[in-house]
Amino acid sequence: MKKAKAFAVCGILSLTLAAAGLAGCGGSVDGTATALVINGEEVNTGTANFILRYEQAETMYMMTSYGLASAGSMWDSPTSSGVTYGSQFKDSTKESIAEMVLLRQHASEYNVTISDDEKAKIDSTAQSVVDGNGDALKRIGATKEDVADALELYTYKIKMKAPMVEDTDREVSDEEAAQTRITYARIALTQSDDSGNVSDVSDEEKASRKEKCEEVLKQVQESEDPATADISTIAKAVDEKFVSTGYNYGSDDTAIDDAVKEVVKNLSDGEVYDGVIEGENTYYIVRLDKMFDEDATETKKKSIISDRENENYNNKVQEWKDAITVDEKTPWKDLTVTDKDSYTVKAEDTSSGSSSTSSGSLTGSSSASSSSTGSSSSGSNSTSGSTSAGSSSSAGSSSSAS
């Protein structure tokens, strides 16, 4: 099986880059030159480019894993605003770097520091990255010190979140979070042709689908216990077009049809509505499972608190951003994110004890390409440590089984 080597942050930030995790071709970059000046603090090209390229590799890995992109045909594609995804991604990464630098600059306001133990772990992690990706790091102009600086920035980002959101209002009433649980079977009153064009079904077909809903309703009502009847199985036996599911919703939910909400208001727990509900281009059969679902409500409360914390955090960071300038120097402007200069995360084949790069390794525009393997015959290099926030590990890949 293949295990992704990822850029993880948990407790003290851990960077996991297997050997040949970044590979490519093209000339090296002067990492000592200043790339960005953020609120008066210079960030050199080595640090900035390392963050840019690893974020690029992680994004490509995730996008291809979910089938949302293919290697070699993502970054040059245009966005709705006219710029390429690569250009948009680079701007987004610049904002992320600015945020992390600001978090480090404001850390003393929240009594956040990096301990000697954490510094040691960052240093050993940076060494693991260099050992496994030496050639690739040379090409992007990043040294061990640059990697360590990036790791420190990510660590501050992790450690700053909790104290910054400590003043968040965490009081959430049952009324605000209340969740209702229903089970429904629905069938659409639209159809699609081979070209994907959607149109309403004919009146005759609409009548036929209503009859099928009535048949589902009848079987549910005549079951041994309508309150627990398997609506999905019953509906599918009548027509495969039915979609059935359990669903929780609250007062702020816009996904569930208003016609369904109105009917549910007058039902009791376990009651099946005695009729076919016509919503927007859809027929429904509905059962109220719980008017007040305690477990779902507690989950919703946690979600509301999380949203408040994120809003609190983002507002504070945005205030800092609004008060400063980010100066892009020529070395940063010269960096590009394109399909011809693509990075990927290494995948480790754990079934054979060996590792291999995924198919999207960095390729360049020159006629010859090169790759960095940085493999070791002695086994995996690993560092692990923990803070009050949790634990993390970093592993360098090797050519032998772990």
Image: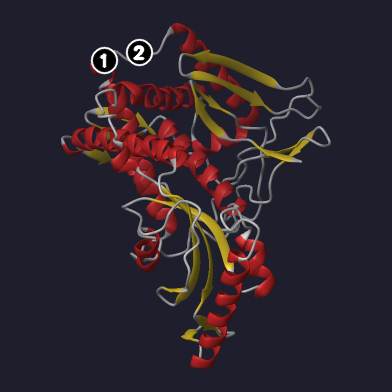
Instruction: Compare residues 295 and 346 and report the one nearer the observer.
Output: 295
**Mark 2 vs mark 1: which is more N-terminal?**
1
Label 1 environment density (alpha carbons within 10 Å; few <14, some 14–19, many ≥20): few
Question: Dot 2: what SS?
Answer: loop
Residue 113 at x, y percent in the picture: 35, 13
Q: Is residue 35 visible?
A: no
> Disc 2, disc 1: CB below 8 Å?
yes
- In this rendering, the answer to whether 143 lies above or below 232 is above
Separation of disc 2 and disc 1 at Cα? 7 Å
Q: Amino acid at mark 1?
A: Ser
Please say if 339 is above or below 43. Answer: below
Question: Which mark is on residue 131?
Answer: none
Amino acid carrying mark 2 in the image: Thr
Q: Quadrant of residue 212?
A: bottom right
The residue tagged with tag 1: helix, strand or loop? helix
Q: Position of residue 164 (x, y in %)?
A: 28, 25
- State the residue lying farthest toward the right: 352
Q: Is residue 317 left or right of residue 123?
A: left
For the question of whether residue 162 can be seen, the reply is: yes
Question: Which residue corresponds to mark 1?
Answer: 108
Query: To which residue does mark 2 refer?
Result: 113
Q: Nearer the viewer, residue 91 or 2?
A: 2
Q: Is residue 215 above or below residue 336?
A: below
Residue in the picture at 28% in, 38% down: 311
Residue density around tag 2, few if under 14, some if 14–19, many if 20 or more, within 10 Å: some
Q: Position of residue 6 (x, y in %)?
A: 58, 35
Q: Quadrant of the N terminus?
A: top right
